[in-house]
Image (tube, grey):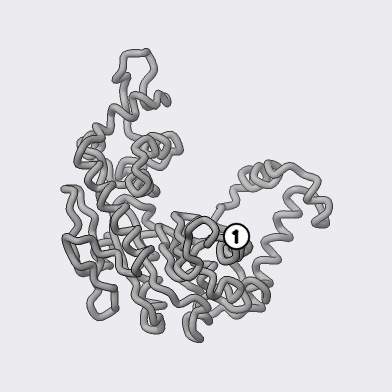
Amino acid sequence: VMALEWVRDNIAAFGGNADNVTIFGQSGGGGKTYSLMNSPQATGLFHKAIVMSGFAPMDTESVPADSLAESEAIGSALFDRVGVDSLEEARQLPWTAFTDADAENNIPRQTYRPNADYYYQPKTYYQNVLDGMPSDVPLMAGVTAGDYTSLRGALPVWLEQRSQDYQSDQYVYKFTRVPEGWEALGLQSCHGCELPYLFNHPTGLVQNFLLGLVLTPEGTRPEIGDLNGNGVTGSAGDPQDIFLSMQYGADDATVSELMMTMWTNFAKTGDPSPSSLQWPAYTEANDTYLEIRQDTEASVETGVDAAMGLD
């Protein structure tokens, strides 16, 4: 919120328009984007939003008191694991004390969720849906073809829960493209694999592999050999082998240009459509989404549930 306030107060000096601000993020960044849409403190500080692979079904039963109490219990349990009784004691520990304690106790990172705190989030997300979101702004939202099943499964539920009461246009996408070498290995576009295309940064795909995000449909890391002959395989972490295995080429550059065009169109006008087609806003009635396909094209499709592999 403070960063957005800085933009409001200062961006004109850099040639920017404080009345046309778009925020977006992927994965945890997508969740943070949606949290800003739900916070009254951010109202008026941005005008469009893009949530990429950052969804979860909303708890339709929870009230603010329950949400806060559940999160406080999670915090107390965390303090117990590291052996502290106060914030002051906790702040004396390195951050690794907390991550190590969670890892040793098999605490899923999904345990930590946004909660109503009567300050940044006075209401639950679902209450905001019913009462009117603090930032009901044009929205883009989507996933990759090989994204985590939990995220692909959450997107249709999330859309159903909020679309009836959402006033602004919302655009849904599915990103399918992978470089031809990885397609030959049977790989699908992974969690985060649209970002290297969006930022025209092919080596970002190498980073995704090294982070363990690039997986086979069976959930294992693909085997990449010693393609450059230096004695270290791609599977062992040689980045050049990983890059060579992708066979990233002109078609990938075409998809990158398309992605950059649609995302910047949305930021400028609120309509992401490229010149080649009209991307219709999603409604429950039309059930449409845009697929950014393997063959370098984009096409308007229907049936979000089926597209997420849920039928």
According to the picture, the residue beneath numbered tag 1 turns out to be 3
Residue type at the position of mark 1: Ala
SS type, badge 1: helix
**Residue 38, x across and y down, in percent:** 53, 73
Left/right placement of residue 160 relative to residue 12 reads left
**Residue 276, x across and y down, in percent:** 16, 60
**Residue 92, x across and y down, in percent:** 81, 46
Instruction: Examine the rendered structure and indicate whether residue 280 appears above or below residue 165.
Output: above
Q: Residue at x 70, y 66 (%)?
A: 72
State the residue in front, 242 or 75: 242
Q: Residue at x 24, y 48 (%)?
A: 255
Q: Residue at x 41, y 39 (%)?
A: 208
**Residue 147, x across and y down, in percent:** 35, 52
Q: Quadrant of the C terminus?
A: bottom left
Q: Residues within 10 Å of mark 1 (few under 14, many from 20)?
A: few
Task: Give the image quarter of residue 284.
Answer: bottom left
Instruction: Examine the rendered structure and indicate whether residue 212 appears above or below residue 5.
Output: above
Q: Quadrant of the N terminus?
A: bottom right
State the residue in front, 201 or 309: 201
Q: Which residue of the protein is positioned furthest toward the bottom in this rendering?
A: 131
Left/right placement of residue 203 relative to residue 254 reads right
Left/right placement of residue 208 relative to residue 42 reads left
Does residue 271 appear in this view? Answer: yes
Q: Residue at x 31, y 17 (%)?
A: 228
Task: Give the image quarter of residue 95.
Answer: top right
Question: Across the whole image, how many numbered discs are drawn on residues?
Answer: 1
Does residue 311 appear in this view? Answer: no
Left/right placement of residue 38 relative to residue 301 reads right
State the residue in front, 278 or 217: 278
